[in-house]
Amino acid sequence: QIQLVESGGGLVQAGGSQRLSCVASGRSFSGWHMAWFRQAPGKERDFIAAISWRDSTKYYQNSVEGRFTISKDNAKNTVYLQMSSLKPEDTALYFCAADPYRLSTVVAAYHYWGQGTQVTVSA
C-alpha cells in the first residue's frame, strides 16, 4: 500500500523559513513523479512544485519560484520543500502527491496523496 506522510508544518513568522518533508513508502518510487500542492481555506488546491524521481526535472509555480526549492533523497524515499521568505499568503495546508506516469502541475494527474501538513505564516 502506497503511503505519503508529510511533516514539518507549523507556525512561522513572515520572512522566515521552513522545510517540509514527504516520506513515501509501499513500493519503489524510482521513475515516479512527486509534487507539492497547497490549499488555503475556501480555496482550490494549487500546484506549488514538482520533481521527477527519474531525472530530477523540476517545475515551480511562478509565485514561489526563487523562494521555494523542491528536492529529493532517493535513499530515504523522501521529497522536501524548502520554503524561504515566507509570506502570510503562503498559509495553507500543504500536500504531497505522487504519480508514476507523468510530471504535471495539475491536481487530477496525481493518483496518490498525503494527508497534508499545515503551514501558518504570521504577519
Image (cartoon, helix red, strand yellow):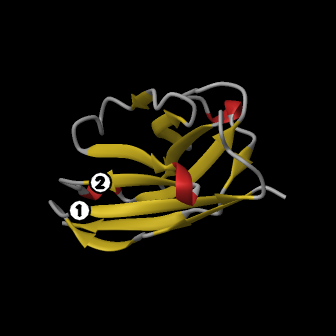
Crowding around mark 2 (Cα neighbors within 10 Å: few <14, some 14 to 19, many 20+) is some
Looking at the rendering, in which quadrant would you find the C terminus?
bottom left
Q: Position of residue 110 (x, y in %)?
A: 69, 37
Q: Is residue 41 visible?
A: no
Can you tell which mark lies on residue 17? 1
Q: Is residue 13 visible?
A: yes
Q: Position of residue 84 (x, y in %)?
A: 22, 54
Q: Element type at marker 1?
A: loop
**Rendered residue at 51%/51% (across/down):** 39
The residues tagged by marks 2 and 1 sit, at their Cα atoms, a distance apart of 5 Å
Q: How many marks?
A: 2
Question: Outermost residue toward the front?
Answer: 75
Q: Is the Cβ of the residue at disc 2 closer than 8 Å to that at disc 1?
A: yes
Question: Outermost residue toward the right?
Answer: 1
Which of the 4 image quarters holds residue 32? top right
Q: Element type at marker 2?
A: strand
Taking 18 as reference, is 43 left or right?
A: right
**Rendered residue at 57%/31% (across/down):** 54
Can you tell which mark lies on residue 76? none
Q: Out of 116 and 92, give the one closest to the viewer.
A: 116
Looking at the rendering, in which quadrant would you find the N terminus?
bottom right
Q: Position of residue 77 (x, y in %)?
A: 59, 55
**Rendered residue at 68%/44% (across/down):** 29
**Rendered residue at 54%/41% (across/down):** 35
Q: Out of 95 and 3, give the one closest to the viewer.
A: 3
Q: Amino acid at mark 2?
A: Met
Q: Which residue is mark 2?
A: 83
Taking 35 as reference, is 10 left or right?
A: left
Which of the 4 image quarters holds residue 67? top left
Q: Amino acid at mark 1?
A: Ser
The correct choice, above or below, for 54 with respect to 67 in the image is: above
